């Protein structure tokens, strides 16, 4: 009888421990945030005379840059290959361009693919009466697409370009000196472009927003040093009620009002601080307002409106002067 009672007591203790553990870990998951959407980087192809290895290296750098945004769980390349195999194709571009439906990929939110259209020197050095100065500038151009893995819908289609100064080679009467090598400059250029692309993707899905305005007027933003840098200038907008297409129900856009211009004063891993510039009043900024980089950001040539219409798809109302965001 005592053995049975003892056994029951042990069972109750184990059950109680399990319940306490579930509650503890449940609260922990709430406290430390919600699950991040998964994203995978597909094939980055090259065109014309761009070396084939460039696409492979760029895909790896883009994967790292997406991780640094802290907005996604990035899928390993090996897992992506398994996904492509399940869909009966070898590449992501083959899936999309071939009309293969992407729906049903368990746990995957977004997929990225694209092509490198330019990578090399965009300007050369000069020579004059025995003095030659080599170098110039190097440019990288990438056509990038972001698709919804469940519907196959293209959310972002843009061209991102980045330019960097090439190595300097000075020659006078046969004597020459050379600064940093072209290979080093090329690597830095590729890494900077990957950062630009990752920031474009993350801010298209999760716009830069005001978390809170502190009592001293300091503006806290929801992105850290993976996206923002000290000295960047942003415009802050209050977003009004959205409007829908009466036939399809699709959200077409929302009216936006420019309320302030701010400059990033400090960045951390998870968030950044900014101050209102002269002529702007931080007290007019509401929590949750959308912010857009206007100085210090990457050069972009938008081909198609991005998700939520953030960017150059917007227009101004001729009567009120207010911005209309094309969603």
Image: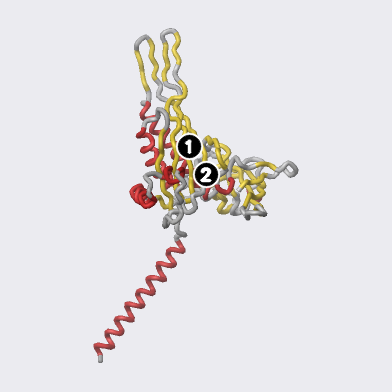
Q: Residue at x 44, y 7 (%)?
A: 129
Distance of mark 1 from mark 2, alpha carbons? Answer: 10 Å
Tell me, what colour scheme is on the image?
A: secondary structure
Residue 278 position, x and y percent, is 64, 40
Kind of element beneath mark 1: strand
Q: Is residue 128 above or below residue 197?
A: above
Q: Is residue 123 above or below residue 96?
A: above
* Residue 7 appearing in the image: yes
Indicate left or right for 164 with 257 as reference.
left
Residue 87 position, x and y percent, is 39, 51
Q: Residue at x 25, y 90 (%)?
A: 2
Which residue is farthest right?
319
Mark 2 Cα within 10 Å, few/some/many (few <14, many 20+)?
A: many
The numbered dot on residue 9 is none
* Residue 203 appearing in the image: no
Q: Could you say which is closer to the camera, residue 5 or residue 45?
A: 45
Q: Is residue 169 above or below residue 100?
A: above
Q: Residue at x 65, y 50 (%)?
A: 254
Residue 266 position, x and y percent, is 51, 44
Residue 286 position, x and y percent, is 62, 53
Label 2 sits on residue: 156
Dot 1 or dot 2, earlier in sequence: 1
Mark 1 Cα within 10 Å, few/some/many (few <14, many 20+)?
A: many
Label 1 sits on residue: 143
């Amino acid at each position: 009888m005592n053995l049975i009672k003892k056994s029951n007591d042990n069972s109750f203790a184990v059950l109680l421990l399990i319940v306490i553990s579930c509650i503890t870990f449940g609260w922990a998951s709430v406290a430390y945030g919600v699950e991040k959407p998964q994203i995978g980087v597909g094939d980055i192809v090259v065109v014309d005379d761009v070396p084939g290895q460039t696409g492979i290296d760029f895909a790896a750098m883009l994967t790292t840059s997406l991780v640094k945004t802290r907005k996604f769980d990035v899928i390993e390349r090996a897992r992506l290959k398994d996904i492509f195999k399940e869909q009966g194709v070898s590449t992501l571009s083959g899936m999309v361009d071939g009309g293969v439906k992407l729906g049903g990929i368990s746990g995957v939110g977004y997929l990225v693919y694209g092509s490198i259209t330019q990578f090399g020197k965009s300007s050369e050095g000069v020579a004059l009466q025995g003095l030659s100065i080599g170098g110039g500038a190097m440019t990288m151009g990438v056509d990038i697409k972001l698709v919804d893995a469940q519907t196959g819908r293209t959310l972002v289609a843009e061209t991102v370009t980045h330019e960097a100064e090439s190595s300097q080679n000075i020659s006078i009467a046969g004597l020459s000196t050379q600064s940093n090598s072209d290979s080093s400059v090329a690597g830095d250029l590729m890494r900077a472009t990957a950062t630009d692309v990752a920031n474009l993707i993350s801010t298209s899905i999760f716009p830069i927003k005001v978390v809170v305005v502190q009592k001293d007027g300091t503006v806290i933003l929801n992105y850290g040093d993976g996206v923002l840098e000290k000295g960047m200038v942003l415009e802050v907008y209050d977003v009004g009620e959205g409007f829908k297409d009466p036939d399809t129900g699709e959200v077409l856009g929302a009216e936006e009002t420019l309320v302030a211009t701010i400059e990033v004063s400090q960045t951390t891993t998870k968030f950044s601080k900014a101050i209102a510039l002269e002529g702007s009043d931080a007290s007019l900024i509401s929590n949750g307002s959308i912010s857009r980089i206007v100085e210090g950001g990457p050069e972009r040539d938008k081909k198609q409106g991005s998700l939520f219409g953030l960017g150059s798809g917007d227009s101004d109302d001729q009567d009120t002067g207010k911005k209309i965001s094309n969603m």
